[in-house]
Image (cartoon, rainbow, N blue to C red):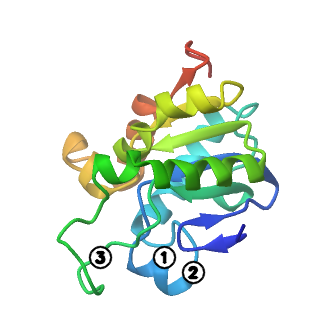
Amino acid sequence: MCLAGPDYRLGDQHPEIAIMGACPGAQEEEQGRPFIGDAGTHLAAMVRIINAISPAKFPSEDRDDYTLLNAHPLPRYKDRAGYDGNTEPTKPEVMCDVNIFRLNQQLQQSGIIRILLAGKRPQWLAERLVVNFPEIEVFMCGHPSLSAWNPRYVGQPRAEKIRLWTQETYQMVHPFRVHR
């Protein structure tokens, strides 16, 4: 298994804890690692907030301390060859057997015990993760993009929007109880 690429990066200090986004974009493909662009900057802020909420579950403020992966590996952006107009994968693409096999391999080989699903596309996988890996703790939060939280908190400074969005969307979903 590759330890780094646009859709996967093994964590530095807590590789057994993962954060999953939707898919790589142009900057991720260019730099060969996940969560580089604006979503990565916002995710870094969200990780600091989640660490303050649940330091026992997410013990670091640094996103690079965690394994970073994506619900689908294909980079999607306008100028990429074969771009189909979608900046995120479809549900059939995320849930297809080949993709599930890829994710299962990444999770097994990384020894993941806890995962944060950041956004709708990764959250489609929650049930499948619980079935395939019943011992993994599964958490969810909103997607770290402007379009997800910007319209919801009109007039608030960006840092406050990210804080509110993270606090409102962060939750434990497996084992099925809220735990912070």
Q: How many marks?
A: 3
Residue at position x 70%, y 71% in the image: 2
Residue 108 falls left or right of residue 85: right
- Residue identified by numbered label 3: 77
Which secondary structure, mark 3?
A: loop
The amino acid sitting under disc 2 is Gly
The amino acid sitting under disc 1 is Glu
Mark 2 Cα within 10 Å, few/some/many (few <14, many 20+)? some
Which secondary structure, mark 2?
A: loop
Would residue 130 be visible to someone looking at this image?
yes
Question: Which disc number belongs to residue 32?
Answer: 2
Residue 138 image offset from top left, x and y in percent:
59, 30
Mark 3 in CB contact with mark 2 (< 8 angstroms): no
Q: Quadrant of the N terminus?
A: bottom right
Q: Is residue 130 above or below residue 156?
A: above
Question: Could you say which quadrant of the image residue 89 lies in?
Answer: bottom left
Residue at position x 40%, y 73% in the image: 75
The amino acid sitting under disc 3 is Tyr
Question: Which disc number belongs to residue 28?
Answer: 1
